[in-house]
């Protein structure tokens, strides 16, 4: 009798090993999918940190341009040519080229030139990038919403003279925004500027 039971046990063991191999393949596949998802997330976070670093550099760029052109810079709203050039409703018009070796520019012309070049740089480097230089006593980092059409609403600039805020906004989403027309992934960098 013992000889009849032996073949039955071998058949059961052979089928059970095949099931173990299939389960191991499924578990291994799920693990690989998890690793792929983790890598995708890391790459996205890395890009986000690159954009934040670029925003810091762009804010420092316009701050240094204002420091260098003290004739057009002031802590009062009417006299500061940088805030008026960067916050106008219309985009900066192509003005005098102050980079030319023979160019002699007034402080106001230099401010307009700096504003035009900075706006172009922000728009080129940051996705849907917009920059604002304004008087803002609150310096609220949560102000500003970047709409899907690229406009900025609620800049949060209160106009109180004495404190200048450089605000950069950009959109890191690839989906195009939310249903209400605003982007849910608007990123901001706010720098308070004092010479």
Image (spheres, grey):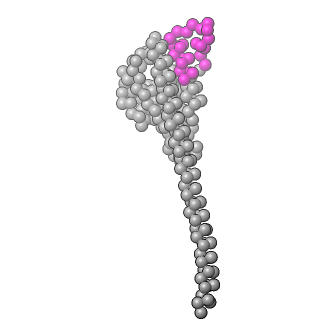
Answer above or below: position of 150 versus 79. below
Q: Nearer the viewer, residue 174 or 51?
A: 51
Depth check, front residue: 147 or 24: 24
* 153 to 63, vertically: above or below: below
Residue 35 placement (x, y as % from top left):
55, 52
Quarter of the image that includes the N terminus = bottom right
Work out whether residue 66 or residue 179 is closer to the camera in this orientation and state it: 66
The quarter holding residue 29 reads bottom right
Residue drawn at (52%, 9%), measured in percent from left and top? 106
What span is colored magenta in the figure? 94-118
Residue 154: x and y in percent read 45, 35
- Toward the bottom, the furthest residue is 1
For this view, does 175 lie left or right of residue 145? right
Total numbered badges shown on the rendered structure: 0
Q: Looking at the image, is 81 positioned above or below residue 132?
A: above
The answer to whether one can see residue 153 in this image is no
Q: Quadrant of residue 126?
A: top right
**Which residue is at 55% across, 28% downward?**
122
Please state which of residues 88 and 95 is positioned toward the viewer in this rendering.
95
Rendered-image quadrant of the C terminus = top left
Q: Position of residue 23 (x, y in %)?
A: 58, 67
């Amino acid at each position: 009798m013992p000889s009849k039971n032996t073949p039955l046990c071998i058949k059961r063991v052979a089928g059970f090993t095949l099931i173990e191999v299939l389960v191991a393949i499924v578990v291994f596949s799920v693990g690989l999918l998890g690793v792929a998802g983790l890598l995708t997330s890391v790459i996205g976070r890395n890009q986000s940190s690159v954009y934040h670093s670029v925003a810091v550099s762009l804010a420092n760029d316009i701050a240094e341009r204002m420091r260098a052109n003290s004739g057009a810079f002031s802590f009062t709203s009417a006299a500061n040519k940088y805030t008026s050039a960067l916050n106008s409703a219309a985009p900066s018009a192509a003005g005098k080229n102050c980079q030319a070796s023979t160019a002699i520019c007034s402080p106001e012309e230099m401010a307009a030139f700096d504003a035009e070049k900075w706006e172009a740089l922000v728009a080129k480097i940051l996705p849907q990038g917009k920059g604002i230089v304004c008087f803002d006593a609150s310096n609220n980092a949560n102000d500003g919403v970047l709409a899907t059409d690229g406009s900025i609403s609620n800049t949060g600039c209160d106009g109180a003279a004495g404190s200048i805020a450089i605000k950069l906004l950009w959109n890191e989403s690839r989906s195009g925004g939310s249903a209400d027309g605003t982007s849910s992934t608007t990123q901001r960098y706010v720098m308070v500027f004092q010479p």
